[in-house]
Amino acid sequence: MADTYEGFDGYVKTPTNVIGGIRHWSLRLVQETLEVSRFDPDATALARRFRRYKPGPLGWTASFDGFVMPTDSGQIEIKSAIELGTELDGYFHLDGDKYYHGKGLLTLENPDLAWDAVGTQSFEMQGTEAVTKYGWS
């Protein structure tokens, strides 16, 4: 089962710059399951009908969004991150000194502009290694 956390602070960093204008992020930690169902002649008729699962691989994804800032060096650098496969650093703060850190690849860039609104954009990233929790005892 996945847990979703929303944060009040955080940032995503290219190899050389923090991406400016971010106002929201969401981190999704995922525990996959592996089906291990089998025939069991000793089980009750009802129990034979249920699938069985074991814990499988862990993973994570994150999304973040904010305002379009065309002169921000981080936003300029992230424009080529999908094509180049640039690994990003995500720092996702929850409360006080509690935060998550992980490296991932940018999988979506979605600018959204309208003539009567401030330009925004959203991004998604796929974790490439374990996400680390800091500040939990």
Image (cartoon, grey):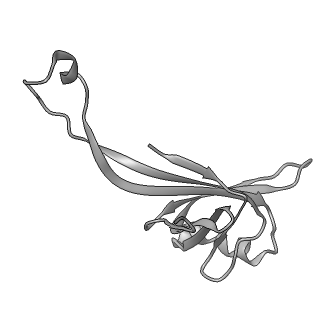
Please identify the quarter of the rendering in which residue 53 is found: top left
Percent across and percent down for residue 126 are: 50, 60
> Measured along the vertical axis of the image, is residue 37 above or below residue 108?
above
Q: Residue furthest front?
A: 137
Taking the image as drawn, is residue 109 in sight? no
Work out whether residue 48 or residue 14 is closer to the camera in this orientation and state it.
Answer: 48
Q: Is residue 132 left or right of residue 32?
A: right
Q: Residue furthest right?
A: 116
Residue in view at x 82 percent, y 74 percent: 71
Residue in view at x 31 percent, y 48 percent: 55
Q: Residue furthest left?
A: 41
State the count of labels. Answer: 0
Q: Residue furthest top?
A: 45
> Measured along the vertical axis of the image, is residue 110 above or below residue 40?
below
Please identify the quarter of the rendering in which residue 98 is found: bottom right
Q: Is residue 57 left or right of residue 68?
A: left
Q: Is residue 135 left or right of residue 17?
A: left
Percent across and percent down for residue 84 are: 54, 73
Percent across and percent down for residue 110 are: 68, 54
Please identify the quarter of the rendering in which residue 74 is found: bottom right
Q: Quadrant of the N terminus?
A: top left
Work out whether residue 68 or residue 39 is closer to the camera in this orientation and state it.
Answer: 39
Residue in view at x 14 percent, y 33 percent: 38
Residue in view at x 49 percent, y 53 percent: 29
Taking the image as drawn, is residue 46 in sight? yes
Q: Is residue 95 left or right of residue 108?
A: right
> Measured along the vertical axis of the image, is residue 96 above or below residue 114?
below
Percent across and percent down for residue 122 are: 69, 55
